[in-house]
Image (tube, coloured by chain):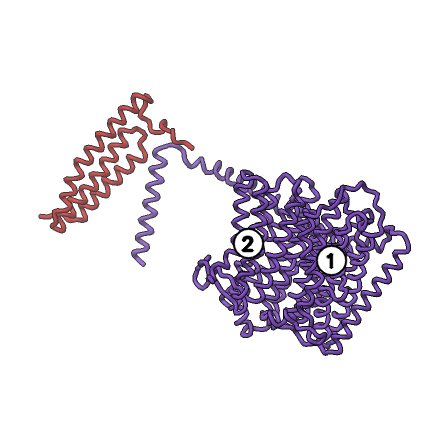
Amino acid sequence: MMVELLFLIPLLPLASALFIMVAGDAVPRRVLTTMAAGAVGIAAALTIWMWPLAADGARATLYTWIESGPLQIPVQILFSRLSATMTLMVTGVSFLIHVYAVSYLHQERDLRRFFSLFNLFVGAMLVIVLADNLLLLFLGWEGVGFCSYALIGYWYRNPEFADAGRKAFLTTRAADVLFGIALLWLFQLTGSLSITAINQQAVMLPSGSVTAVALLLAAGACGKSAQLPFSSWLPDAMAGPTPVSALIHAATMVTAGVYLLCRLFPLISLSPTALAAIGLTGAATAFYAAASALVQRDIKRLLAYSTISQVGYMFLAVGAGTVTGAMFHLLTHAFFKSLMFMAAGLVIHLAGGEQDLYRLGQLPKRAPVLFWLMLAGAVALAGVPPSSGFFSKDAILAACFARATPYWTGLGGLGLLAAFLTALYALRLVYLLIAAPMDLPSHGQAPLGKTWPLLPLSLLALTAGLLNVPHTLGGTALLDQWLSAPTGIAPARRMEWGLAVATCLLVMAAWQLIRNWRRSAPVFTVGGCTRFFASGWRLDKMIRAVLTVPFRNTGRWLQRCPEKWLTLVLPGRLGRWSQNAGQAFRHVTSGHVSDYLSAMLWGTAWLLIMLTALLAL
Amino acid sequence: MMVPLGHVVTLAGLLFTAGLLGVLLRRNLIMILIGVEIMLNAAGIVLVGASAYWRHPAGQLFALLLMPVAAAEVTVALALVIYLKRSRGTLDVNRFDGMKG
């Protein structure tokens, strides 16, 4: 098996993107869509075919991208157990979402733009996943950022949607600056940008620098993964078409931050401060977004907040030291969240574009298959045993509690509280889909052709947890063995069971609450509290007050004072001054030959005197 | 008997000063040209005197070179003088102030 064939995995979607970009309008739509989905499908098949290589980690170099003194940037990919797992998830889920998008967007006019960007996104994402060099990874990192921006603003004629794209772009870019600083710092410290080399040398680095670099990397990851305080772009990013939300803003791109931290875990784990900060960010975000999701009206915004919250769990896992836990939750979340997004998209289509949860009810009657699919996703999200979310969330919380310090127990408690809220909002979503009135004209049945990509995902959402049932619960911990990555401190048998029971109880409590609530009619109450949580804890307003307004005022002041002075007043004065000087000096040139001659005489005399003086010295 | 070098240099200096003053003070273009010629010949005298003093022929060669150069210069200059007289109607240099700033 040729190792170089690994390059086909990212290059196939990239080549397809290029082709669609250039010649998309010249080929029939059917060819275009088949090509877009096919390229990703082949990449997925290739990943499976190459899978045996990952056991020992395969490395392939295409060519040297940048070579300047000690700076060596080879275009090199590393097909390790970690990256292969991620590659398989990305290509597999992307393929299903591509297939879904083909039927979902069949009425769209500008398919060429959509699918070229969609394929470009997959290619860039695979570059992130497979790159063994931080600069190459950064290239993919910015690539997915650009695609995200362009696809959020896909319907750019609506200024609000275009603004949402810009917001996402600017927010993530702000975090990327910190990531870039970390990159340069790492190069300065280790003289290399290869992830493998950095991880190997990490032990020898001064601990202060390691902490600073790890914090900068975590901040960069927070931007991409919509963690506090960079989280406010993700709910607005729902302006894009639903396949975009499913692929970019649920399954793949927003988890890239977590993946980055997992790849660089040997470095990050050397700094307890950074781990504590990452854990705190994760737990706080998980709770913050779960509370916000609880009162959302818009089905897609609810799912967006849910994504933020779930990615928070992954950060908590990295902080608690369990890379396996983070990757496990990353995988299960990708399955059930993309499933829920795609189902939500079909629900919205069925209601003719309505996104208000309180008007999307009676789903079991209108589209039973769709309802069951949505239920499968919600069950996994809520963490109902034995669905995938139950096991992956429990693993993370167990890793927190196993550290047995007050700090981590507190974070675990916060995570548990967020788990309760998660169950609550997931069941609320299901309940509203059942009970809310449906007064909209029906737009026909959901065609089965659109739902089939959801079936494998729903199966995975329900059963993927069995991949990694811990030994204490009588499982085989397959993923632990395969990844052979740090799993944190192993929790005691009693704690594992206690946690599982606690989670079950929480889910049941949430179910009871929702059942009680169900007796009253589903009416959206607009209290101050609801409004506070629905607006994401007023995060946007806070950012506006703390960042945007001062920035704008500073800009205005700079425009009014220094800019005006430097570009208008000062150059004007300088110009006038030199003009006056010229006017004064023009009288020197009298035009009389004798004046010039005497000037020449005096000049020569002065020169001679100077020369004499020099010679005399 | 040799003429002492000091005398030669003094004569040349006096001649050069006379020529320079003529160039600076006269207003008539022809007189200025005469001043230039006197300065050139002062230089020639120094060259010949020095050649005799050091017994080296280079100075005399230079003096010989100086004569045709001076003649050529005067030829061109006089042509210009005639042109100026025709076009401007005067030879007063203070009237030629086309370069006034």
Under tag 2, what secondary structure? Answer: helix
- A132 left or right of A614 in image: right
In the rendered image, residue A244, in percent from the top left (x then y), is placed at 66, 50
* Residue that badge 2 annotates: A42
In the rendered image, residue A442, in percent from the top left (x then y), is placed at 79, 42
The image quarter in which residue A315 lies: bottom right
Viewer-side residue, A155 vs A174:
A155
In the rendered image of the structure, the colour used to display chain B is red
- A434 left or right of B28 in image: right
In the rendered image, residue B10, in percent from the top left (x then y), is placed at 21, 45
Viewer-side residue, A329 vs A460:
A460
In the rendered image, residue A364, in percent from the top left (x then y), is placed at 80, 51
Viewer-side residue, A417 vs A428:
A428
Q: Is residue A401 visible?
A: yes
Looking at the rendered structure, which numbered label has been put on residue A184? none
At label 1, the amino acid type is Gly
Chain under numbered label 1: A
Q: Is residue A274 visible?
A: no
Chain under numbered label 2: A
* Residue that badge 1 annotates: A377
Q: Residue at x 69, y 41 (%)?
A: A159
When the figure is inspected, residue A29 is found, relative to residue A227, above or below; the finding is above
Q: Which numbered disc flags the more N-terminal residue, 2 or 1?
A: 2
